Image: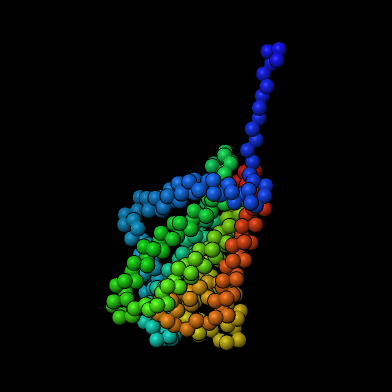
Amino acid sequence: MNGESEEHILIIEAGRTHSRYLHDLWLYRELFLILAWRDIIVRYKQTVIGITWSIIRPLLGMIAFTIVFSKIANLPSDNVPYPLTVYAAMLVWQFFNNTVSIGSESLLNNSNLISKVYFPRLIIPSTSMTVSLTDFLISAIVFIPLFFYYRVFPNWRIVFLPFFIFLTAITSLGATYIISALNVKFRDFRFAVPFALQLGMYVSPVGFISSVVPGNWRLLFSLNPLAGIIDGVRWSLFGTQLYLPSLVMSAAISLLLLLGGYFIFRFMEREFADVI
């Protein structure tokens, strides 16, 4: 070759097709586990009482909502002790709230990693769900003494509880994908997200039951996917009323939110390394 050597250039780029991208997600599953474990460790690092915060926060929320909506407003609770109905809803809401709160900032917090090496960026906001799920499982332990204290125990309907947790997870991820992607390009979103989440808690049936919503507003109220999910969790635990159209709408909107979030994220992902 007359002293000349051939140079081979290897170009690494994201999968152009969705099938290739999903394949990459599977190949990088170990990275997902590593980042998820890192997020869980960081969540409780240098805190005095550690994972106990996962129990204290929903308990304090339960007490506050019970006082406001049960003692002061005197709202009904469908023949179930009010603290139980509130606590069930608080767990669902905090699962959603924590996933979106952590996930919306995740791309910005991992900017160095994104700008240096290729991997499916969808992995980063997805790990926020593992932190929220950990909090959810720890907080759910409080139900055991609450059940015995109020002498209210679940029946066969509890077998449907994992389905409603799954709906919460895909709803949370769908919203997280959209907000985290928009947050990279439009930094104003990081200030709007906390306000939107705070407002969302009050328009969701966290401190009240959905049956108090007037009938002519019920369908519009059901456009909030968490409404049907929270009602479903209460139904599976306590046998309370379940508005079937709301549940169907919640499942459909949750699935559309996940798919829409995925495609929006994929569309904007190509610009992350340039603008982050």
Residue at 38 percent of width and 83 percent of height: 80
**Could you say which is closer to the camera, residue 48 or residue 213?**
213
Compared to residue 37, the image places residue 3 above or below, namely above
**Residue 180, position as x, y percentages in the image:** 58, 55
- The answer to whether residue 147 of the structure is visible from this angle is yes
Which residue appears farthest toward the right when viewing the image?
A: 2
**Residue 162, position as x, y percentages in the image:** 45, 68
Residue at 43 percent of width and 68 percent of height: 91
Q: In which quarter of the view is residue 140 placed?
A: bottom left
Compared to residue 144, the image places residue 14 above or below, namely above
Residue at 59 percent of width and 75 percent of height: 249
Residue at 36 percent of width and 82 percent of height: 81
Q: On the picture, is 263 further left or further right than 78?
A: right
**Could you say which is closer to the camera, residue 198 or residue 239?**
239
**Residue 30, position as x, y percentages in the image:** 48, 46
Q: In which quarter of the view is residue 144 placed?
A: bottom left
Q: On the picture, is 157 further left or further right than 18?
A: left
Compared to residue 23, the image places residue 176 above or below, namely below
